[in-house]
Amino acid sequence: MNPPSPSPEASAHSGELVATIGREIAVRGGWIPFARFMELTLYAPGLGYYSAGARKFGAAGDFVTAPEMSAFFGRALARQVAQVMEASQPSLLEIGAGSGRLAADLLLELEALGSLPERYEILDLSADLRERQQATLAAAAPYLLPRVRWLERLPEAFSGVVVANEVLDAMPAHVVAWREGGTFERGVGFAETGGFTWQERPATGALLAAAGEIGAQCRLPPGYESEIGLAARAWAAEWGHRLQCGALLLIDYGFPRREFYHQQRGRGTLMCHYRHHSHPDPFHLPGLQDVTVHVDFTAIIAAADAAGLDLLGYTSQGQFLLNCGILDLLAREQPGTPEYIRASGAINKMLLPHEMGELFKVIAIGRGIACPLLGFATGDQSRRL
């Protein structure tokens, strides 16, 4: 089944972003790193996928995240959030809050647990999504809105819990090719027939160093291509300067390094999502489709550790949600009702290994947290990192 064609208005929007990217390529000598292309196609002001107004989440969008599937995701996660807040400060910061569904579910469940945060802060680059988040919260829990505020940048200092669900995968990543003649950065230039095309230049600087380390550790053969998330590493390290006491709970799809750069994954993990269709072409309809890469969780904890943070746990999403009692929450519902059947189906997708349960991982990174975390009580896979 082919994805639906965009409307004339959407096509014009994409064309405007293509022209913007094209002008930057021309100014920079006919080539830009893929990381810059990804940054523009996702975040160019007013034009990028996350900066414009198209609906992205849910059945009417391009993909469905776990919080959109069922409130039980947020309800289970709330138990881990409450534990960390009790061990640090009653503050919660959500990065990239999407539609606001997770924020609403967390607040309502934390209220039920008697663990409401004094502040629920949201950092999102999209003005359109901020408006949608406000509407979602106003509809679900209007009396809790006074606790919520939106930030323009990371706080200089923070204690409490940071939640980021499917955020790292959307951070611009470099693409590298390990060739017989050396290590090359894959970037974007103009095709003779029009449009964008892949072009390579010798890798340099921090990217070359990272590629050399990965190539040596994983013994990559000539011709191997993959991504290196320098921005995600830098973001994780930045919390070493900002987090005073508490934990980051990062939920995303990815692997430990030796699985990420497996011999059989020789063309990387780059994937695009448009109207619930997935494909590997980042040059298709820029601005109208999501562009993502999987997460190298080994690189994330290495960067955080070097910045003085601790690894508090790492496991699959399925195991994390089980540890947080998601099935106990489901057991409180009335079996056989339409609500129970819908919730049960969604929870199965979150837990089962061939669905989201194994591909998605949860990593906790923090400072000043001495107690073992609930979500990693059994099945902790930290040794794999």
Image (tube, grey):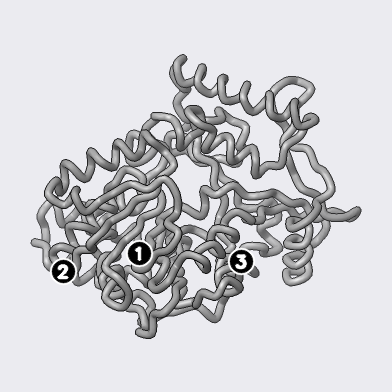
State the residue at coordinates (29%, 64%).
91
Within 10 angstroms of label 1, few (less than 14), some, or many (20 or more) residues?
A: many
Where, by quadrant of the figure, is residue 130 drawn?
top left
> Which callout, 1 or 3, points to the residue nearer the camera?
3
Within 10 angstroms of label 2, few (less than 14), some, or many (20 or more) residues?
A: few
The outermost residue toward the top is 8
State the residue at coordinates (43%, 34%).
275
Left or right of residue 22: residue 62:
left
Q: Which residue is mark 3?
A: 299
Give the CA distance from mark 1 to mark 3. 25 Å
State the residue at coordinates (28%, 56%).
120
Q: Residue 56: percent from the left, percent from the top?
A: 39, 37
Q: Amino acid at mark 1?
A: Leu
Q: Which residue is mark 1?
A: 351
At mark 3, the secondary structure is helix
Name above or below for residue 22 compared with residue 126: above
Left or right of residue 80: residue 185:
right
The outermost residue toward the right is 181
Name above or below for residue 70 compared with residue 364: above
Which is more N-terminal, label 3 or label 2? 2
Q: Which residue is mark 2?
A: 113
Q: Nearer the viewer, residue 117 or 378?
A: 117
